[in-house]
Image (tube, rainbow, N blue to C red):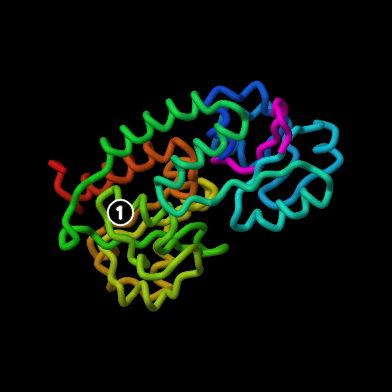
Amino acid sequence: MPEKIERVVSLYPSITEILVSIGFLANIVGVSSWCKLFVKEVRKIPSVASATAVNYERLKSLNPDIVLVSTGFQQKLAAELYQQGFNVYPVMLPKSLYGIIENVMVVGSLIGRREEAGKLVEELLEELKTYSVKVSCEERPKVYVEFWPESYSITAGRLTFVDDLIYSAGGLNLFSKAAGFFKPDFNEVSRGNPDIMIFIFERKADAEMGIEPLIARRGWSHIKAVKEGRILVSTEKELPLTHSGPSFTLTLKLLSEKFKELKLIDRSN
């Protein structure tokens, strides 16, 4: 790692948000196009990559001191960047909400903004305490969440920040006994009979097309969530369940409020 870091390229939205939140925006010289979907402050900063592919000619022209990526599906990209001669640091994909908070300290320490990171951590811990819902296991609604239906169809199990987010909001993830991110077994969803189903689309146009045809094709008309009209269709921008940046506390608040609005958990919690 370089002794002093002044020019940073960040290719993962949550890392970019951390940098902005601890006052390092002026030092970000490049981002991914993906980052711009979640962090409005970097929309005028040059894009040098998509989520998994880099324009190396453009990246070299920025002369970064370090390139920040995530683990998970960006691990291959991290190795590629290193082979191309860049200083690269892969920040761990968090397995819980506390993992998101830990990443704030990791990134802050890395770039020499430890004090600013510490203050943000204190704020996030307080917000996490405020917005978390305490519900007994018996009262927790079963929640099925699916990302990018009809293109990838990915859900989350335990050891993911998504699973922890659902639990902290007062719910119980339908696939909490499985681990990581994976393609769900639609028959298991049917047998699990969730109380609420959440579908997150990448684009608003896809979300507006409606979920009824998908429900019909998968034979889910008998599921409790479908019969009682507890289906939440949203975009990543409106309900960023896949985003593991400091704004996760706002997502937690939105999700818990939705559970209360649908009378899945007691409003007094």
**Would residue 261 appear left or right of 53 to someone viewing this image?**
left
- Residue positioned 36% across, 50% down in the render: 165
41 displayed left or right of 137: right
- Residue 39 falls in which quadrant of the image? top right
Could you classify mark 1 by the number of other residues whose Cα lies within 10 Å: few (under 14), some (14-19), or many (20 or more)?
Answer: many
Horizontal side of 102 relative to 255 (left or right) equals right
- Which is more toward the observer, 224 or 140? 140
The location of residue 248, given as percent across then percent down, is 42, 40
| Labels in figure, total | 1
Q: Residue 242, how many percent across, how many down? A: 48, 50
Q: Residue at x 61, y 43 (%)?
A: 12
Task: Inspect the image, locate mark 1, and give the three-letter code of the amino acid beneath it.
Answer: Tyr
167 in the magenta segment: no
**Label 1: which residue?**
167
The magenta segment: 1-14
Secondary structure category for the residue under label 1: helix
Classify 269 as above or below 22: below
- The secondary structure that dominates the magenta segment is loop
Q: Residue furthest front?
A: 3
Give the position of the C terminus as an image quadrant.
Answer: top left
Q: Residue at x 40, y 45 (%)?
A: 98
